[in-house]
């Protein structure tokens, strides 16, 4: 069984089903804080990703903060036709270890305007509410994005770190075209969200799709499947995600071209029914 090669977001944005997550092009490793240690390498990675065929790059104003978006524009603007830049707002970074929710409409309007400027865009194709702020009704936060869409500054609206109930509430305010949640072989807590996305034609962008690989790599089943396909375990995990649902649009990130090439090659792997069943939950 071959997973579909492309996915359409919002009815008019058709992209390859493997995107690129731009968290790690900022500095600080997984903290994504500050500038990259090697700016030239970060720019080269972005250009190589697009050259290879990546059609969706996912970023956020909080990556850096502001660093990832700035690097994307420097490396790729003017953007090639068909490239979707998806970004997010609603988290602030007062220090390295902090990711503070801010879903106030005023903040989201300011964040979107700043992202437009950094990315050198007049309209952001996919703008995502990065998280639910417990201090702000999510209807107010989503409503602010709906107003920005009416103003022509956002093409489509997505949400991130939402459960099924929160997603249903957001969809009563405006059209939601995507959900970005934590999801990987070790953490499948968003299974129900994926099912809703598949049923209703929303894209699901799993963040940290390869997270926890040290534990996953120890799985004899995963290693066996990887050996059959002459692939790495990371490639098999990505192939599994692509097979999991046609709504799935993984966005693995890296700071290294070699690692990107490894991830990108996972698109060519077709898991058999037996391979896929090896990862079913007991």
Image (spheres, helix red, strand yellow):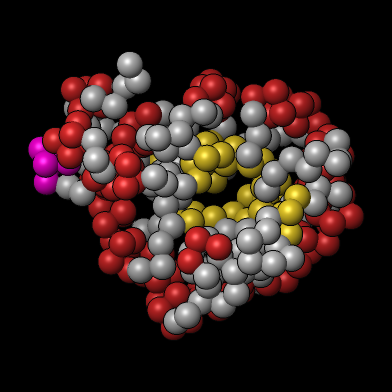
Nearer to us in this view, 16 or 266: 266
Q: Quadrant of the N terminus?
A: top left
- Residue drawn at (24%, 35%) of the image: 219
Q: Quadrant of the C terminus?
A: top left
Magenta highlight range: 225-230
- Residue drawn at (17%, 47%) of the image: 231
- Residue drawn at (25%, 21%) of the image: 277
Please state the horizontal and vertical placement of residue 33, each as a whole percent of the image: 59, 69
How many labels, in total?
0
Residue 88 on the magenta span: no
Please state the horizontal and vertical placement of residue 140, each as a whole percent of the image: 87, 39
Q: Is residue 67 above or below residue 98?
A: below
Can residue 266 be seen?
A: yes
Please state the horizontal and vertical placement of residue 52, each as a whole percent of the image: 33, 62
Residue 227 on the magenta span: yes
- Residue drawn at (80%, 39%) of the image: 134
Can residue 4 be seen?
A: no
């Amino acid at each position: 069984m071959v997973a579909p090669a492309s996915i359409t977001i919002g009815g008019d944005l058709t992209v390859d089903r493997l995107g690129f997550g731009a968290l790690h092009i900022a500095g600080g490793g997984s903290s994504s804080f500050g500038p990259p240690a090697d700016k030239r390498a970060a720019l080269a990675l972005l250009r190589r990703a697009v050259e290879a065929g990546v059609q969706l790059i996912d970023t956020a104003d909080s990556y850096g903060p502001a660093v990832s978006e700035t690097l994307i524009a420097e490396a790729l603007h003017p953007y090639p036709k068909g490239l979707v830049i998806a970004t997010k707002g609603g988290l602030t970074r007062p220090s390295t270890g902090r990711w503070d929710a801010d879903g106030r409409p005023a903040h989201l309007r300011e964040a979107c305007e700043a992202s437009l400027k950094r990315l050198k865009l007049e309209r952001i194709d996919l703008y995502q509410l990065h998280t639910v702020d417990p201090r702000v009704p999510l209807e107010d936060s989503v409503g602010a994005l709906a107003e920005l869409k009416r103003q022509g500054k956002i093409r489509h609206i997505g949400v991130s770190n939402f459960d099924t109930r929160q997603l249903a509430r957001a969809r009563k305010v405006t059209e939601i075209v995507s959900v970005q949640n934590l999801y990987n072989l070790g953490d499948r807590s968003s299974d129900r969200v994926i099912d809703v996305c598949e049923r209703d034609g929303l894209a699901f962008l799993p963040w940290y799709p390869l997270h926890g690989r040290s534990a996953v790599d120890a799985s004899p089943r995963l290693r066996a499947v990887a050996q059959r396909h002459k692939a790495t375990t990371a490639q098999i995990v990505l192939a599994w995600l692509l097979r999991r649902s046609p709504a799935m649009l993984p966005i693995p990130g890296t700071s290294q071209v070699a690692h990107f090439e490894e991830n990108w090659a996972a698109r060519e792997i077709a898991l058999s029914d037996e391979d896929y069943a090896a990862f079913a939950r007991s």
